[in-house]
Image (cartoon, rainbow, N blue to C red):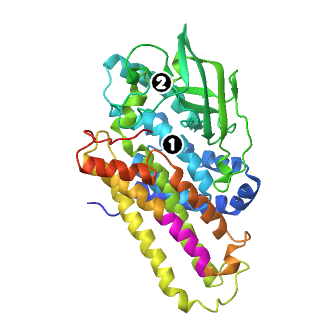
């Protein structure tokens, strides 16, 4: 068992840490206050080549695999959690299109076509493009396939096949990077009579395509710089070559690689670390504006230790889970992934609120980042499909052999 990152992983982790501390963190308060998208953070990601983090090296990217991405994302979140969470959408699209797809079953002709199409998309990303990932839908309508443990949800966004492409209609919500990303990797169900999974599509839709709009206000409690408005699709024409994945592969991938959703937890692991580090900085007078010295620092030692115990135990479980991520992972690995996700969900709320408590009343003021960490932490429990309730149901059903498949019960 390798307990240390590789040399290449350490290089990328260091790059992420430097960007987070030197560039993202000084701007995070402004973006949170204004609920504004961090275009400046993305300019830094572009300059450093990190938009191509998960693009294979043969296309000009940095070639990071799933595990490496999660390690880097943990660092980025310590500068701005909203930036890290939106970056997750982009990198997941690259991973799905690249190394995860490479390990999925495809006919030779399908794989050859996918290779041709993704080469163009990868090169666009290396040149500076990035993707949103509008998966959520406010009203789940349409057919559902109960045989699918993950991805068998009701699917409201539909695509009608026409000559040269598809006409897409639907409404997504909580679309992070709404109106900010050049492209959106958008799930849709093709109208037809074939089995559900065969009709799943994953399409590249430009933000300025006719019929695309991002209505609504954005004024949430936390993760404010994600700018996650609705996305409305009204008779949007999408050409055939805009397929991010071959038809049918999106639904199959949800079930074959349920670790997809564990990537969200990297952001919240980073939030925990940031809260811990800043609580120590506050208590020791290293944070600007903090009392020097803090009069009760010795008495608060046990609480600081408890925070560290929570972070390190969550990190240990999470690191093992991401190291086991693979297509068609064994059931015990999927169970550990669920457990890691729930552990991070619980720990990030506990650690961030404890950071404020041990710093005292002034730690609750918005002039310090502790309050922002606590608000951002609340979003962890909303990251479907492995919210705490769903993960726990799937875990016990799998343990008792009631679900019949590694993916577990419940929808995405």
Q: How far across and how far down the image is residue 182, in percent?
A: 65, 33
Q: Residue lying furthest top in this view?
A: 163
Q: What residue do we see at 70% from left, 50% from top?
A: 40
Residue nearest the observer in this picture, 378 or 392: 392
Residue 253: say if magenta: no
Q: Is residue 291 above or below residue 327?
A: below
Dominant secondary structure, magenta: helix
Q: Is 180 left or right of 199, judged from the image as shown?
A: right
Q: Quadrant of the C terminus?
A: top left
Residue position for label 2 = 201
> Which element type, helix, strand or loop, lies under badge 1?
helix
Sooner in the amino-acid sequence: mark 1 or mark 2? 1
Residue nearest the observer in this picture, 296 or 52: 296
Name the mark on residue 64: none
Examine the rendering and report whether any part of residue 62 can be seen.
yes
Q: Residue lying furthest right in this view?
A: 34
Name the mark on residue 91: 1
Q: Is residue 99 above or below residue 83?
A: above
Q: What residue do we see at 64% from left, 50% from top?
A: 44
How far apart are the alpha carbons under marks 1 and 2? 19 Å
Q: How far across and how far down the image is residue 369, in percent?
A: 66, 68
Magenta span covers which residues? 347-358
Q: What residue do we see at 59% from left, 32% from top?
A: 184
Residue 248's image quarter?
top left
Residue nearest the observer in this picture, 214 or 286: 214
Q: Is residue 339 above or below residue 56?
A: below
Residue nearest the observer in this picture, 382 or 301: 382
Q: Is 26 left or right of 96, judged from the image as shown?
A: right
Examine the rendering and report whether any part of residue 322 can be seen.
no
Q: Is 169 left or right of 302, judged from the image as shown?
A: right
Residue 376's image quarter?
bottom right
């Amino acid at each position: 068992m390798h307990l240390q990152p590789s040399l290449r992983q350490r290089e990328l982790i260091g790059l992420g840490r430097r960007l987070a501390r030197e560039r993202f963190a000084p701007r995070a308060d402004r973006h949170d206050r204004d609920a504004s998208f961090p275009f400046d953070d993305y300019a830094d990601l572009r300059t450093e080549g990190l938009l191509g983090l998960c693009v294979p090296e043969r296309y000009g990217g940095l070639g990071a695999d799933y595990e490496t991405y999660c390690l880097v994302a943990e660092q980025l979140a310590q500068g701005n959690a909203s930036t890290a969470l939106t970056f997750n959408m982009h990198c997941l699209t690259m991973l799905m299109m690249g190394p995860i797809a490479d390990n999925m079953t495809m006919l030779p002709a399908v794989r050859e076509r996918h290779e041709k199409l993704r080469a163009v998309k990868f090169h666009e990303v290396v040149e500076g493009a990035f993707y949103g990932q509008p998966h959520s839908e406010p009203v789940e309508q349409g057919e559902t396939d109960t045989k699918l443990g993950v991805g068998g949800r009701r699917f409201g966004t539909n695509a009608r096949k026409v000559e040269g492409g598809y006409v897409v209609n639907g409404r997504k919500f909580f679309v992070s990077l709404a109106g900010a990303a050049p492209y959106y990797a958008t799930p849709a169900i093709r109208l037809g009579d074939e089995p559900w999974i065969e009709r799943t599509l994953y399409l590249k839709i430009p933000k300025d395509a006719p019929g695309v709009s991002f209505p609504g206000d954005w004024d949430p409690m936390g993760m404010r710089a994600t700018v996650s408005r609705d996305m409305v699709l009204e008779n949007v024409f999408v050409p055939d070559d805009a397929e991010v994945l071959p038809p049918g592969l999106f639904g199959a991938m949800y079930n074959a690689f349920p670790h997809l959703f564990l990537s969200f937890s990297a952001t919240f692991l980073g939030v925990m670390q940031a809260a811990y580090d800043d609580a120590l900085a506050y208590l020791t007078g290293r944070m600007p504006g903090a009392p020097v010295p803090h009069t009760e620092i010795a008495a608060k030692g046990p609480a600081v230790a408890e925070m560290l115990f929570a972070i390190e135990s969550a990190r240990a479980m999470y690191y093992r889970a991401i190291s086991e991520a693979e297509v068609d992972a064994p059931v015990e690995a999927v169970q550990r992934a669920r457990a890691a996700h729930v552990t991070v969900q619980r720990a990030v709320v506990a650690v961030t609120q404890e950071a404020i408590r041990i710093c005292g009343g002034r730690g609750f003021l918005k002039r310090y980042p502790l309050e922002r960490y606590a608000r951002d932490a609340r979003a962890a429990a909303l990251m479907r499909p492995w919210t705490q309730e769903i993960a726990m149901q799937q875990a016990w059903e799998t343990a008792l052999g009631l679900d019949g498949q590694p993916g577990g019960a419940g929808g995405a």
